[in-house]
Image (tube, rainbow, N blue to C red):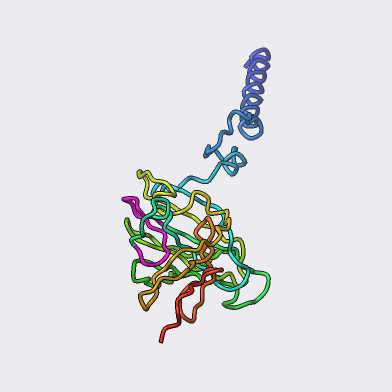
């Protein structure tokens, strides 16, 4: 091999090695911002992938996911009111105050809470949650699902069903309401019986009216106060019923 050919071969060999090293280095360190788009699976774009939003559940359509207003810090309270019947000035199809799902779709209601994890508190860590459903006020206590510092309870409401719920916080906090429909369906909070903004509990003062008494007479009475998001008042476990503030009637006592 001539000296000239050896020199040329050496130059070509070094050029190829340098080019290969440069290409490899580019693959590791030369990633441009435009190469790292959200949802990219390339390992060099780990930061962009991690920052991408979590994929939505394709099986549900969210209607609401935020706080519930008016939850008392102690004791139990009940939510449930037929806003549509009240707006139309007609009696509700349910004898007691209940939300009514007037949509043709099942609705999934999830109540969730933040629970303490920094100290031992046993069952007092968990909220008390139960649903009241149908005209006979069936008591449904779904299992509490715990995940990290979150506890939740879920119930699916049928089309046309009346429903309400009871909450007792105990040592839990940050009560939230999540409402979803099946994917591909379309409805609104109002159609499924809920207020347009469950996070606001604005007091609706009591009004007096005439009621019929047990002896056939008429007297002045009032159902009491309620709140704009369906909060009705304190719930008493002893008789499984709620009491509105300011409720009264002037009927004679029963004999």
Whole-percent x, y for residue 210 in the image:
44, 65
The answer to whether 33 is drawn above or below residue 96 in the figure is above
Q: Is residue 186 magenta?
A: no
Image position of 1 (left or right of 90): right
Along the line of sight, which residue is nearer the eye, 43 or 50? 50
The residue shown at (42%, 51%) is 87
| Image quadrant containing the N terminus | top right
Task: List the single residue furthest toward the top.
Answer: 4
Quarter of the image that includes the C terminus: bottom left
Where residue 191 appears, x then y in whole percent? Answer: 39, 49
Segment colored magenta:
94-108
Would you say residue 96 sits in the magenta stretch? yes
The residue under the point 58% across, 33% down is: 36
Looking at the rendering, which quadrant does residue 211 occupy? bottom left
**Residue sitting nearer the eye, 42 or 175:** 175
177 w.r.t. 57: above or below: below
- The residue that appears at 62% across and 72% down in the rendered structure is 74
195 relative to 59 in the view: left or right? right
Q: Main secondary structure of the magenta part?
A: loop
Q: Looking at the picture, how far across and down is residue 6, in whole percent?
A: 65, 18
Q: Position of residue 63 (x, y in %)?
A: 46, 48
């Amino acid at each position: 091999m001539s000296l000239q050919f050896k020199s040329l071969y050496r130059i070509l060999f070094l050029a190829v090695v340098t080019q290969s090293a440069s290409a490899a280095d580019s693959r590791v360190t030369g990633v441009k911002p435009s190469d790292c788009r959200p949802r990219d699976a390339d390992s060099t774009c780990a930061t962009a992938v991690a920052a991408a939003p979590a994929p939505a559940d394709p099986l549900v359509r969210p209607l609401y996911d935020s706080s519930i207003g008016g939850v008392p810090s102690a004791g139990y309270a009940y939510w449930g009111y037929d806003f549509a019947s009240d707006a139309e000035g007609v009696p509700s199809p349910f004898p007691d105050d209940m939300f009514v799902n007037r949509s043709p779709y099942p609705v999934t209601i999830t109540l969730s809470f933040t629970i303490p994890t920094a100290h031992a508190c046993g069952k007092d860590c968990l909220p008390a949650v139960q649903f009241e459903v149908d005209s006979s006020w069936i008591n449904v206590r779904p299992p509490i699902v715990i995940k990290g510092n979150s506890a939740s309870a879920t119930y699916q409401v049928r089309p046309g069903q009346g429903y309400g719920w009871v909450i007792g916080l105990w040592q839990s906090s940050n009560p939230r309401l999540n409402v979803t429909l099946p994917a591909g369906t379309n409805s609104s909070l109002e159609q499924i019986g809920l207020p347009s903004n469950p996070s606001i509990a604005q007091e609706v003062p009591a009004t007096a009216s005439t009621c019929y008494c047990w002896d056939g007479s008429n007297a002045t009475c009032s159902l009491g106060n309620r709140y704009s998001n369906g909060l009705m008042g304190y719930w008493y476990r002893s008789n499984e019923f709620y009491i509105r503030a300011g409720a009264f009637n002037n009927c004679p006592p029963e004999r």
